[in-house]
């Protein structure tokens, strides 16, 4: 699995951060949509519900060097790019405010008062539930599916296989139809 630094490095190769705050929020949204679309985290680093929005503590005060040659699949790169198209024009402050209105950050903060320091983790389960629901409702970035490179069956082969299976199971199908 990749690290948050590697993902930030790939993002930086596609988009110049307006500041550290924006980087943390984009990492949060990339992770959240990866969980929604693929059911798995994109990176292993923890995300916490700080007072100004989600933060990846392992990258606090870190200078990220742009690198598009991070070991990611074409689908992972396409997912990140889709998230950037949707969110990257927003400042870190705007993304923080957006996250404050969403369930994962709110659940992690629990009873912490606004403006109070908090280091509670934002759970993968909470992100997956929230952003899967948004995706299903047509809200948020649009995932671009990348062909896997697997060979697609020829229609004649499919029809031939169906005919053979129908013939093989003809008697059983007749009994079931009665």
Image (spheres, rainbow, N blue to C red):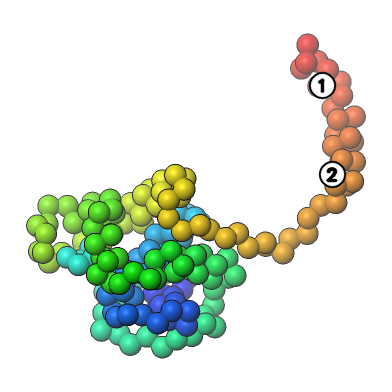
Mark whose residue sits in front, 2 or 1: 2
Whether residue 160 can be seen here: yes
Q: Which residue is depicted at the point 53% across and 71% down?
A: 77
> From mark 2 to mark 1, how far is it between C-alphas?
21 Å
Q: Quadrant of the C terminus?
A: top right
**Is 153 above or below relative to 64?**
above
- Residue 66 rendering spot, x and y as whole percentages: 45, 86
Compare marks 2 and 1 and give the one earlier in the sequence.
Answer: 2
Secondary element type, mark 2: helix
Q: Nearer the viewer, residue 167 or 106?
A: 106
Whether residue 48 can be seen here: no
- In this figure, which residue is indicated by the disc labeled 2? 158
Left/right placement of residue 75 relative to residue 51 reads right
Q: Secondary structure at mark 1?
A: helix
Give x and y (percent) for residue 161.
86, 41
Q: Which mark is residue 151?
A: none
Q: Which mark is residue 172?
A: 1
Q: Nearer the viewer, residue 127 or 96?
A: 96
């Amino acid at each position: 699995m990749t690290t948050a630094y590697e993902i930030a490095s790939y993002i930086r190769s596609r988009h110049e951060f307006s500041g550290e705050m924006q980087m943390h929020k984009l990492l949060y949204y990339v992770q959240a949509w990866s969980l929604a679309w693929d059911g798995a985290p994109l990176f292993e680093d923890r995300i916490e519900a700080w007072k100004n929005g989600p933060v990846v503590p392992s990258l606090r005060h870190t200078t990220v060097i742009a690198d598009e040659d991070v070991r990611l699949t074409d689908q992972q790169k396409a997912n990140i790019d889709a998230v950037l198209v949707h969110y990257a024009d927003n400042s870190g402050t705007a993304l923080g405010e957006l996250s404050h209105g969403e369930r994962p950050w709110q659940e992690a903060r629990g009873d912490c008062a606004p403006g109070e320091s908090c280091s509670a983790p934002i759970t993968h389960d909470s992100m997956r539930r929230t952003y899967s629901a948004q995706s299903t409702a047509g809200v948020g970035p649009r995932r671009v599916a990348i062909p896997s490179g697997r060979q697609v069956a020829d229609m004649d082969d499919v029809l031939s296989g169906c005919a053979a299976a129908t013939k093989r199971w003809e008697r059983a199908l007749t009994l079931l139809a009665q």
